[in-house]
Amino acid sequence: MLYEGVLRKMQTENGHPIQYFLTLGSDFLNLNQMLDRELHIDFIKFQCLNCGEDKPIYRQGFCKSCFYETPLAGDWIMKPELSTAHLDQEDRNLEYEKKMQLQPHIVYLANSSNIKVGVTRKSQVPTRWIDQGAHEAIEIVEVPNRYLAGITEVALKDHVSDKTSWQKMLTNRIEDVDLVEWRDRLKPFIPDEVADYFIENNGETHLEFPVHQYPEKVKSLNLDKTPSYKGVLKGIKGQYLIFEDSTVFNVRGNEGYYVGIDFN
């Protein structure tokens, strides 16, 4: 059966294991049910997530002009410390920025390839951790806006990484760490204006991904270079599909690509 549509990041539902869903056009696919089946991906065209035109995707699913214009790609998204809505100052669209920035945010520790610090809206817990392929995570602080979360992340990344090695995450070469101990160890480095928001008594969240076989060494599928690919789906972790031949495909990294997908 052939499905066709523009790629967007997979939706998830926490469970044992996590359930993954892909929306293509009017179809809503549970990818867990496709494990151990052959999947065929064909790149058809581009479709910018903002303007909808067939233009090469620049970043985050947007063509180059939209990336520098849409409020959905402002610098504050990747760098929360640049948020200004709490000052009533506009970046690209103040109404949108207030809606997204002026809500509860979490600063957290997650372990996917290594321990890292990150920021997400409270409403995105545990979705953000799932998208990063973290097998364990813990909240450090809960603050009322994105700016306070951002300055906390900046302060803490002097003492712990803010990056994930996606290759290590996908080969499952991971070590369990005591995130409660790490949370308490980092407490003295939290900025003074955030200190009252520290979360004292919470435990780790553990996540289980639907993977039947991890690759020894990964090779990434690039639709620009390989517009047609066929392989047996063996797992899903983070926003990646993992195939039997050690190929991995970053669904979120290919947002804005219009594809055809078939299963045998």
Image (cartoon, helix red, strand yellow):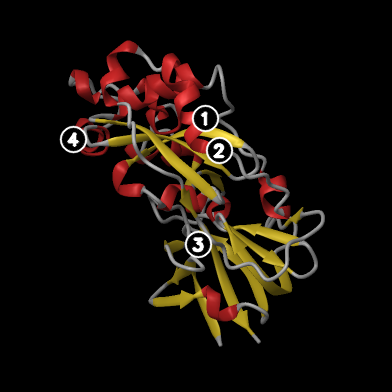
Label whose residue precedes the other's in the sequence (1 or 3): 3
Compared to residue 186, the image places residue 114 above or below, namely below
Q: Write down the residue under mark 1.
A: 182
Describe the element under mark 3 as helix, strand or loop: loop
Q: Quadrant of residue 178?
A: top right
| Residue 10 percent location from the top left of the image | 47, 61
| Residue 148 percent location from the top left of the image | 31, 22
Marks 4 and 2, how far apart in space?
A: 40 Å
Describe the element under mark 4 as helix, strand or loop: helix
| Residue 5 percent location from the top left of the image | 48, 70
Label 3 amino acid? Answer: Leu
Closer to us: 149 or 3: 149
Q: Write down the residue under mark 4.
A: 95
Q: Nearer the viewer, mark 3 or mark 2?
A: 2
Label whose residue precedes the other's in the sequence (3 or 2): 3
Marks 1 and 2, how far apart in space?
A: 6 Å
Q: Write down the residue under mark 2.
A: 178
Residues packed near mark 2 inside 10 Å, few (<14), some (14 to 19) or many (20 plus) = some
| Mark 1 in CB contact with mark 2 (< 8 angstroms) | yes
The residue under the point 52% across, 79% down is 3
Label 2 amino acid? Answer: Asp
The residue under the point 76% across, 70% down is 244
- The answer to whether 236 appears left or right of 142 in the picture is right
- Where does the N terminus fall, quadrant-wise? bottom right
- The answer to whether 6 appears left or right of 217 in the picture is left
Label 4 amino acid? Answer: Glu
| Mark 4 in CB contact with mark 1 (< 8 angstroms) | no
Label 1 amino acid? Answer: Trp
Label whose residue precedes the other's in the sequence (4 or 1): 4
Compared to residue 111, the image places residue 158 above or below, namely above
Which labelled disc corresponds to residue 7?
3
